[in-house]
Image: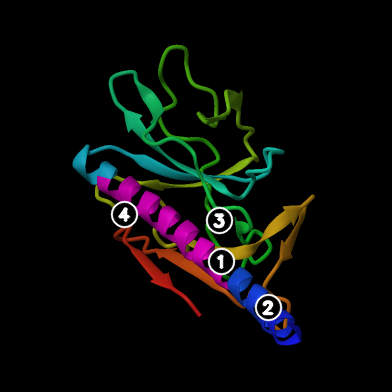
Amino acid sequence: MAVLVIVTGFLVPAVASLGRSTALVTGGNMVANLANQARQTAISKNTMTALVLLTAQGTPEDYRAVMVLEYIAGGGGWSPATGWQTLPDGIIVDFADPTNCTFYEETPAAFPFLTGPPVQKNPPITYKKTQVGPSAFSARIYLPTGGLQNPEKSAQIRIVEGFAQGTQLVRTHPDGTGKSANYYDIAIVGATGTTKISRP
């Protein structure tokens, strides 16, 4: 019986760690797929698309919900190309590491061509039927060529194990420096819009 208790004591943390690592990969793959979809839609429809991350909207999904918008010419304006997709529980975009998570830079102050009946608000984004505030999202726009608007600006998304506690990020798998020991990096190449994935 004592042996079973000891073995269980080793197994439970290992299984929990494996589960979090699996969730991290699942979440990273989801965001990478959305980025690739945004690029492909821009090219195939000869339009602009946007990869959008919910940030400080005041919901449990802040820094965890991602979607793709597309611009529909002829008065359609910006419209969802996908629904919101949410990272698994315990997985979040690392909003506290601006060095390795640069996606927030160059978010459009105003989306181009705000049209549609009636004229769309800026940003043209809603979450659960609520208008997203101008400082409650991050986005990068893909051009019809597949590349990014402002291609010279870094666009890297770092996804980590953790959760938001108010305005603070709590990392559940930190390294010795307080950064995340386990992460999933998605770098969007500005000139081409293609993605590069890296893991520790």
Q: Nearer the viewer, mark 3 or mark 2?
A: 2
Q: Is residue 97 above or below residue 9?
A: above
Q: Is residue 60 above or below residue 102?
A: above
Is disc 4 placed on a helix, strand or loop?
loop
Which of disc 2 and disc 1 is earlier in sequence? 2
Query: How are the colours assigned in the image?
Result: rainbow
Tell me the CA gap for discs 3 and 2: 46 Å
Along the viewing direction, whichever of 75 and 31 lies nearer the viewer: 31
Q: Which mark is residue 8?
A: 2
Is-magenta flag for residue 24?
yes
Amino acid type for the residue under numbered disc 2: Thr
Q: Is residue 198 above or below residue 68?
A: below
Q: Is residue 28 left or right of residue 89?
A: left
Q: Nearer the viewer, mark 1 or mark 3?
A: 1
- Quarter of the image where the N terminus is located: bottom right
Disc 3 and disc 2 in contact, CB within 8 angstroms: no
Overall secondary structure of the magenta section: helix
**Classed neighbour count for the residue bearing mark 4: other residues with Cα under 10 Å, few (<14), some (14–19), many (≥20):** many
Q: Which mark is residue 19?
A: 1
Residue at the spot 63% in from the left edge and 43% down from the top edge: 61
Looking at the picture, how far across and down is residue 157, in whole percent? 51, 61
**Classed neighbour count for the residue bearing mark 3: other residues with Cα under 10 Å, few (<14), some (14–19), many (≥20):** some
Amino acid type for the residue under numbered disc 4: Gly
Is-magenta flag for residue 14?
no
